[in-house]
């Protein structure tokens, strides 16, 4: 059996010779690759100071929060005023008082906009959800004093047009209340635009926070818009009691007579307009109070509507109810176009047998 050779540690002279050999190879460019790998690993293994690691963690958290805020529509963005349009949704507010608009513009000019508007993106740029008065004030400032080319905005991502209507109503109800007529008009227009199928559905969705009694009143206000919208020049000036009294006259079937009276009188003020309708309102109220009447008027026949959208942005709406048929035109319609339509209708009806 072979004897094992006993290993002995190198002598100090041998170790010195080895070190000198390694040094010569390093100086001559023959550094071993493993040396580079070991050096890099050593450098990477050095931990960052605690303060630097904490700063790095905060940066990552801030980036995550920023991405989440942008995704949820909570990040304010500067949007060109010219890219924000209000034609995508029938606005609930009919008119903005000029003095209020000037006050708002002056406040924005002095202190800036405290509350961004709300928009959503579509093929035409950005459609307004809420902030109509603020947008108008910015446009006024841009035209009168310059600047204000961009407006702070939250860019939302609503899943349905119904959500847009609800947000618009809630904003105006909370901040600057709508008139009684505008509440009914908003619900009626939401049905007309096809956002909701029935008036009840529209009222319950748009005014969900309102009491049952208030929602019932809003349905009455919507009736006024459906029957008299094109005849009333001062509808927003009517208070709640006047609206409810007028709705009573309409339920009594006096709508055609009221329309004719308004057409003939052509009232120039809110007071004159109300006086024209007051006689019909009082007649309906007297009939409702008459003894032996036998209860409330019978329910009206339901009104059905069909709407067709044309490629040029004009919508044709057909309405059928107890009083017959009606055709309404929505969108960029001129008086000449309406006259041409009437001529064509006369031609068709005149030739009917």
Image (cartoon, rainbow, N blue to C red):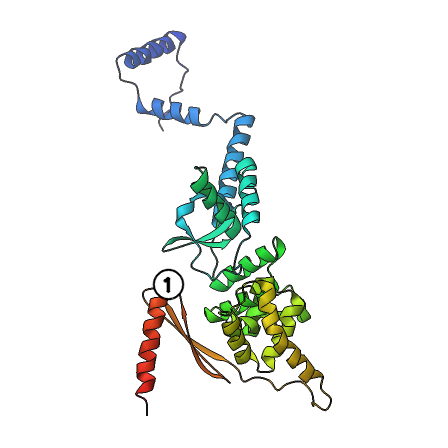
Whether 236 is drawn above or below 299: the answer is above
Image quarter where the N terminus lies is top left
Q: Based on the displayed image, in which of its 4 quarters is residue 239 positioned? A: bottom right
Q: Residue sitting at 54 percent across and 44 percent down? A: 102
**Up-down: is 88 above or below 17?**
below
Where does label 1 land, which residue?
332
In this view, the residue in front, 195 or 259, is 259
- Is residue 207 visible to the viewer in this orientation of the structure? no
Q: Position of residue 227 (x, y in %)?
A: 52, 75
Q: Residue furthest front?
A: 265
Left or right: 261 with respect to 81? Answer: right
Q: Position of residue 224 (x, y in %)?
A: 56, 72
From the viewer's side, name the closer residue of 282 and 186: 282
Name the spot of residue 307 as percent of width and height, x first: 41, 74
Position above or below: 229 against 179: below
| Label 1 secondary element | loop
Residue 346 horizontal side relative to residue 233, left or right: left
Residue drawn at x 56%, y 65% as measured from the top left = 235
Rendered residue at 48%/80% (across/down): 304
- Which quadrant does the C terminus fall into? bottom left
């Amino acid at each position: 059996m072979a004897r094992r050779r006993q290993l002995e540690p190198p002598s100090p002279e041998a170790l010195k010779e080895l070190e000198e050999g390694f040094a010569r190879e390093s100086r001559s460019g023959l550094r071993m690759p493993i040396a580079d790998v070991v050096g890099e690993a050593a450098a990477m293994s050095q931990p960052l100071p605690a303060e630097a690691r904490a700063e790095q963690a905060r940066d990552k958290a801030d980036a995550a929060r920023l991405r989440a805020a942008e995704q949820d529509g909570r990040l304010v963005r500067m949007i060109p005023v010219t890219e924000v349009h209000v034609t995508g949704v029938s606005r609930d507010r009919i008119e903005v008082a000029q003095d209020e608009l000037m006050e708002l513009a002056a406040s924005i000019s002095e202190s800036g906009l405290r509350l961004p508007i709300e928009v959503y993106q579509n093929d035409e740029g950005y459609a307004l959800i809420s902030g109509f008065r603020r947008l108008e004030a910015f446009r006024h400032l841009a035209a009168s004093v310059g600047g204000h080319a961009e407006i702070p905005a939250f860019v939302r991502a609503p899943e349905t047009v119904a959500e847009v209507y609800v947000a618009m109503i809630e904003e105006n109800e909370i901040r600057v209340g709508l008139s009684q007529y505008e509440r009914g008009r908003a619900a009626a227009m939401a049905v007309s635009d096809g956002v909701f199928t029935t008036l009840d559905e529209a009222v319950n969705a748009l005014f969900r926070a309102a009491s049952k009694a208030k929602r019932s009143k809003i349905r009455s206000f919507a009736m006024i818009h459906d029957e008299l919208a094109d005849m009333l020049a001062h509808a927003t000036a009517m208070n709640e009691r006047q609206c409810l009294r007028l709705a009573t006259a309409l339920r009594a079937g006096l709508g055609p007579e009221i329309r004719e009276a308004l057409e003939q009188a052509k009232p120039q003020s809110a007071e004159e307009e109300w006086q024209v309708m007051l006689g019909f309102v009082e007649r309906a109220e007297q009939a409702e109070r008459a003894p032996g009447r036998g209860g409330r008027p019978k329910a009206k026949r339901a009104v059905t509507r069909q709407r067709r959208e044309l490629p040029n942005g004009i919508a044709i709406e057909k309405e059928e109810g107890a009083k017959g048929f009606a055709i309404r035109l929505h969108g960029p319609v001129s008086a000449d176009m309406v006259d041409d339509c009437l001529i064509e209708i006369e031609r068709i009806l005149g030739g009917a047998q």
